[in-house]
């Protein structure tokens, strides 16, 4: 099996928790190293990896084929562009960029350079989302007429990371939690015809948007996307109503918790939710009222990296395309526009 030398652009929580364990586990990747501006931490975890002191040094390393841009949001465009121009394939953390214009430029540049460009929308491989998608695809609810997707937390204190709390490109909940649920909605229901957004700042002294309520309009469907930091008792992460009944599912994927606890992916129990978190299906079937719990599918972020490998080595379709990342950015920008004018915004066809 060919091995793809991969470098991270930081080795903080994102690199250490969400990327390095899967690069180490997958036999088709080698963690070449990470850009570490002042520290030399990566070799404590991966002794064979290199600590690059500058971005230029990393990009000049001809052995590196794939670069993962996992730096602060406002840097995504600049660093992804530099990596593409250096001839590297690129994975960009969400949000793809800070603006639609930046995303469009990266999509175009990747095509010109003949490089693969993907966005790390890992929540597609959450156990809860995979289960919701299965319920919809199997037609258990009939035609979906209304849906809600939540990504809520209780965290009323401002982040100590200043770049997350100062107004500027890529800051606020729309660029933080927003890309997760926007991408999930687009995967389930496609591009909306229009949207309306209500964006607020609720935490004391907050200078950024930290509460989002977006309504997506489809011909026979409405989808509400909600996220905030004042939800102590979480609502179901997914609420679906169809012509045959309803499905409620908690957002209960365990992978992030397991990774932060230092657990390593790869065992048979990886990504298995507790049985108590199973979703509730309540439908009419054959004239009878049926109320039952639906077993949760197993989550596995490794599947994203499997897809990246197949694309780079066997020319298969990327697991998340840059064009899909661009569409997420279009929804984000339209949400800002809607909030500013307090009107429904029509979405231009892609």
Image (spheres, rainbow, N blue to C red):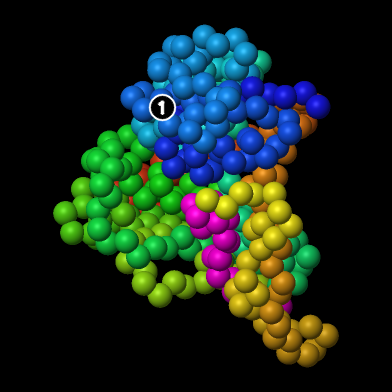
From which residue to which does the magenta span run? 244-261
Q: Which residue is mark 1?
A: 40
Per the image, label 1 sits on a secondary structure element best described as loop
Q: Where 197 sits versus 231, above or below?
A: above
Q: Residue furthest right?
A: 286
Q: Which residue is more in the foreground, 328 or 242?
A: 328
Magenta span has 125? Answer: no
Residue 252, given in percent of the width and then of the height, sits at: 56, 66
Badge 1 crowding class, 10 Å Cα cut-off, few under 14, some 14 to 19, many 20 or more, is some
Q: Which residue is more in the foreground, 183 or 123?
A: 123
Which quadrant would residue 310 be assigned to in this image? top right
Left or right: where 239 falls relative to 173: right
Residue at screen point 47% across, 22% down: 51
Q: In the picture, which quadrant includes the C terminus?
A: top right
Left or right: where 70 falls relative to 350: left
Residue at screen point 72% across, 72% down: 295
Q: In the picture, which quadrant includes the N terminus?
A: top right
Residue 104, given in percent of the width and then of the height, sits at: 51, 26
Q: Residue furthest left?
A: 205
Left or right: where 110 falls relative to 37: right
Residue 230, given in percent of the width and then of the height, sits at: 32, 66
Which quadrant would residue 282 be assigned to in this image? bottom right
Which quadrant would residue 213 be assigned to in this image? bottom left
Q: Where 298 sits versus 14, above or below?
A: below
């Amino acid at each position: 099996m060919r091995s793809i030398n991969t470098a991270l652009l930081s080795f903080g929580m994102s690199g250490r928790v969400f990327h390095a364990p899967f690069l180490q586990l997958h036999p088709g990747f080698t963690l070449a190293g990470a850009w570490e501006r002042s520290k030399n931490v990566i070799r404590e975890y991966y002794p064979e990896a290199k600590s690059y002191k500058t971005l230029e040094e990393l990009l000049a390393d001809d052995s590196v084929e794939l670069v993962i841009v996992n730096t602060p949001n406002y840097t995504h465009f600049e660093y992804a562009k530099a990596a593409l121009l250096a001839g590297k394939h690129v994975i960009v953390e969400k949000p793809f960029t800070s603006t639609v214009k930046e995303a469009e430029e990266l999509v175009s540049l990747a095509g010109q350079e003949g490089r693969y460009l993907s966005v790390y929308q890992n929540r597609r491989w959450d156990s809860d989302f995979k289960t919701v998608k299965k319920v919809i695809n199997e037609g258990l609810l009939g035609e979906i007429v209304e849906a809600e997707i939540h990504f809520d937390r209780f965290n009323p204190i401002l982040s100590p990371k200043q770049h997350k709390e100062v107004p500027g490109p890529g800051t606020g909940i729309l660029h933080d939690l927003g890309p997760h649920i926007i991408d999930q909605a687009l995967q389930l229901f496609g591009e909306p015809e229009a949207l309306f957004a209500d964006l607020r700042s609720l935490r004391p002294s907050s200078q950024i948007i930290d509460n989002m309520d977006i309504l997506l309009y489809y011909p026979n469907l409405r989808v509400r996307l909600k996220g905030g930091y004042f939800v102590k008792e979480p609502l179901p992460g997914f609420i679906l109503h169809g012509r045959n009944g309803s499905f409620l599912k908690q957002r209960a994927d365990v992978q992030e918790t397991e990774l932060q606890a230092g657990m390593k992916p790869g065992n048979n129990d990886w990504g298995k939710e507790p049985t108590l978190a199973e979703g509730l299906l309540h439908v009419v079937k054959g004239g009878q009222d049926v109320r039952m719990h639906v077993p949760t599918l197993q989550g596995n972020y490794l599947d994203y990296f499997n897809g990246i490998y197949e694309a780079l080595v066997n020319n298969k379709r990327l697991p998340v395309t840059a064009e899909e990342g661009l569409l997420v950015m279009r929804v984000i920008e339209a949400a800002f526009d809607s909030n500013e004018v307090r009107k429904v915004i029509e979405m231009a066809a892609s």
